[in-house]
Amino acid sequence: MSSYHTDTVTGPAEWSNYLINGDKSGLTPEEVRWADEWAALECGDGDIVSCDGEPYFSRSTFAWRTTPYTGGDVVDYQILYRVPD
């Protein structure tokens, strides 16, 4: 039986529909690439499964270091990791 571990990371709110549901509508190809790169760095082999609460403004999140943004609305994403037996 597998066990799981969860973690929380903060990232851009505008990416939530894509990161959770795979819906790219409203995002440019460049924004999709940024979201994919961010998710790979922040989440590794985990899966983003949800986000909590209302978006809030932040100037300090890892995503702002890998995109041209200088701040914006963010949410807290929940990541699910499978722990090997």
Image: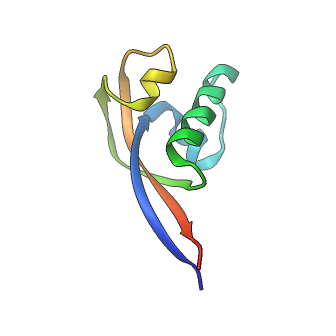
Farthest-out residue, bottom: 1
Left or right position of 32 against 12: right
Q: What colour scheme was applied to this rendering of the protein? A: rainbow
Query: Quick one: which residue is furthest to the front in this view?
Result: 85
What residue lies at 43% left-to-right and 36% top-to-bottom?
Answer: 11
Residue at x 41% of width, y 57% of height: 7
Q: Nearer the viewer, residue 42 or 77?
A: 42
Decide which of 41, 63 is in the foreground and name it: 41
Give coordinates of residue 21: x percent, y percent: 61, 48
Write down the quadrant of residue 6 in the picture.
bottom left
**Quarter of the image that includes the C terminus:** bottom right
Determine which quarter of the picture holds residue 36.
Answer: top right
* Above or below, comparing residue 35 to residue 1 in the picture: above
Q: Quadrant of the N terminus?
A: bottom right
Q: Position of residue 64 (x, y in %)?
A: 43, 23
Q: Quadrant of residue 27?
A: top right
- Rendered position, 27 above or below 41: above
Toward the viewer: 74 or 43?
43
Which of the pair 24/35 is nearer the observer?
A: 35
Count of labels in the image: 0
31 over 85 or under it: above or below: above
Q: Position of residue 44 (x, y in %)?
A: 57, 49
Q: Residue at x 32, y 27 (%)?
A: 60
Residue at the location (59% across, 73% down)? 84
Residue 65 visible, this orientation: yes
Residue 26 at least partly seen? no
| Residue 51 left/right relative to 18 | left
Residue 13 percent coordinates (x, y): 44, 34
